[in-house]
Image (cartoon, rainbow, N blue to C red):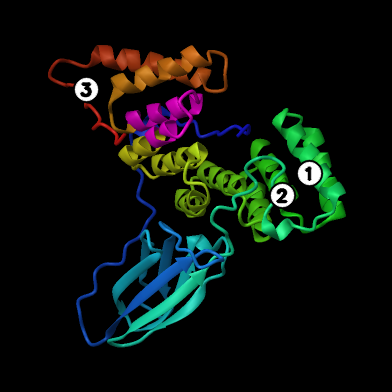
Amino acid sequence: MRYRNCFLATLASLLVTATCAQEQLAPIPPSSGAGNLRCVVEDSHGRPLSDIPIELHIITPPIERVRATTSADGFVSIEYLRTGTWELTAAGGILLPSKHVQVGTDSTTTITLRLPVTLGNAPGYGGQTVSVQQLGVPERVRETIYRAYDAWMHNDLRQSRALAMRALEMKPDYGPAMSLLGILELQEGHPEEAIAGLLGALRYNPDSVRSYIALASAYNQLRKNSEALDALAIARNLSPDSWQVRYETGRAYLGMGQFQRAMTEFDRSAEVGATEAVVLHVGKAHALLGLRDYAKAKAEFDIVLQKDPKGPYAEESRNLVQLLDAKLKRIAPSEPIVQAASATR
């Protein structure tokens, strides 16, 4: 993707472990006043969706919350829920509104959620592709949005925006045009506006992997990392080999202070085709700072400077290399550098 991911952080902030945003319901002991919930999440054709976050919170006080993810077969089972009405949300409610679920005493409530996505039909990743919902779009609209994406790929943002607006004038519910406008907002430094636009776009173009990646990037910029993971869970089902999905997932874990998980995702991103991406080395460097592996962090910043000495991350990398050089020289033999555990490769 051509839009710039701006998540540069200071050395001090990365050495403070962030509070994990995922809440887990404390185990409820078996009793006659508890029930169970079994939920399955599917695509539009009934195929299972894995790793989709499911969040529940009970409506009546005291408030309790639980967050879990679906398994490979699309199922998640939650036991010993307090009886009553729970509000259930899948993937942050990006594609489906939350719904009320009644949990009864000593019983299992089963619910099926069908998200309006189609596995294996992931458009919005190459500029001119569209979803099934966009079939029948007039040729002049398709031609206009193709030109808009082409202008964007050539960094002509003004022309790209003008063409996307023209496409929307011809077809107001045209998802690819709405997605492009959201991406442009993100690239121009307006993540809040980008989120609003991209959420609207996904209602009309729910198979657009690019839109989920941009949405996650906007959430990550605002440090709404849990919401970013919601968007990325859908994107990963649609495009499991996307390096950008893995990269944004790493950014989300980085923002949550889960540095080893961030490293794992950055490594996976490299494995699926982004070995030369400078942003991966920036991400790894920050994760290694969080793990207090300063020598390896410095090595990653050095790679950034070698690959792109005048790029958007060069100044920060140069400054941190100087700080790390000084820190490494001050470390006494009695204060060994903490080495990070090897990331899963």
Q: Quadrant of residue 249?
A: top left
For this view, does 289 lie left or right of residue 237? left
Residue contact between numbered discs 1 and 2, judged by CB atoms under 8 Å: yes
Magenta stretch in the rendered image = 267-289
Query: SS for tag 3?
Result: loop
x, y percent for residue 299: 36, 17
Q: Which mark is residue 296?
A: none
Q: Quadrant of the C terminus?
A: top left
x, y percent for residue 277: 50, 26
Amino acid type for the residue under numbered disc 3:
Ile
The residue indicated by pointer 1 is 145
Q: Residue 187 or 331: which is nearer the viewer?
A: 187
Q: Which residue corresponds to the image point at 36% horizontal and 44% vertical from the top-left?
A: 18
The residue indicated by pointer 2 is 176
The residue indicated by pointer 3 is 337
Chain-order first, disc 1 or disc 3: 1
Q: Which residue corresponds to the image point at 34% horizontal and 37% vertical from the top-left?
A: 264
